[in-house]
Image (cartoon, grey):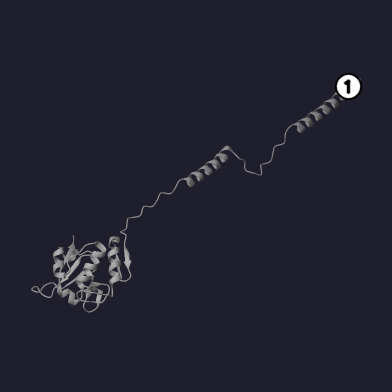
Amino acid sequence: MTKTIILSALAIISLTLSFFYEESLTQTQPAKPNAPAFTAITPYAINSGQDLAKSLELKALVKEPAIVKASVPEGFFSKKLGLQFNNIENKNLIETVSKWLGTPYRYGSASRKGTDCSGFVTSIYREVYGIDLSRSSRSMFQDVKRVKRKNLRTGDLIFFRRSPKEPIFHVGIYLKGNKFVHSATNGGVRVSSLNEAFYSKNFYAAGRVI
């Protein structure tokens, strides 16, 4: 009987020790963490942010290449003459001519109070170019180099005569688009067209002062 009591006691002790051993394991083993509520910051994520910042800094430092515009001839528009000119070199001539518009015709004179055709041309050339031309339209024709009508340029001189046997009687300064400025007996200094019947019929030649 004593043997039975001893065995029962040992069994109870074994069960007790087994219980305490499992409890100790449960307390010492760390609980598995739940899934994090935030995104983990990895070295790749950190480096990506740094690369993006550097990229933005470099983009701010690098200037966009300048757009090269095609060169366009510099020009100007004359309100008084109603003409557009592509060459700025003629601006002084056009501005000077414009000041003379409306000057009355006066034979033998060459001033803003009154002027004839050759007086007007000589005054303009002296003021704009510093060139002294011959006083009459006929002698003035000897001062120029002949040019074809299709090759006329702003500032060239144009001459008129009524027939092949008659001398030159009129001169004007070519502008552009078949327009020229002159001092006419029926209106003083004004702009006319070579397409007008009278001037088209009596056109004789064109010349350029060299």
Query: In the drawing, does residue 124 fall left or right of residue 53?
Result: left
- Count the marks: 1
User: Which residue shows up at 91% across the image and 20% down it?
Assistant: 2
| Residue at the outermost bottom position | 186
Quadrant for the N terminus, please. Answer: top right
* Residue closer to the observer: 68 or 77: 77
Across and down, in percent, residue 8 comes to: 87, 25
Across and down, in percent, residue 196 comes to: 20, 76
User: Which residue shows up at 89% across the image and 20% down it?
Assistant: 3
Quadrant for the C terminus, please. Answer: bottom left
| Residue at the outermost right position | 1
Work out whether 114 lies above or below 89. Answer: below
Q: Which residue is mark 1?
A: 6
Across and down, in percent, residue 164 comes to: 9, 73
Work out whether 37 lies above or below 186. Answer: above
Across and down, in percent, residue 66 comes to: 40, 50
Residue 81 appears in view: no
Residue 122 appears in view: yes
Query: In the drawing, does residue 11 fall left or right of residue 207?
Result: right
Work out whether 175 lies above or below 57. Answer: below
| Residue at the outermost top position | 3
Please name the amino acid that badge 1 sits on.
Ile
Query: In the drawing, does residue 7 fall left or right of residue 50?
Result: right
Task: Name the image quarter holding residue 4.
Answer: top right
Q: Secondary structure at mark 1?
A: helix
* Pointer 1 local density, CA inside 10 Å: few below 14, some 14–19, many at least 20: few
Task: Name the image quarter holding residue 89.
Answer: bottom left
User: Which residue shows up at 28% across the image and 66% down it?
Assistant: 94
* Residue closer to the observer: 69 or 3: 69
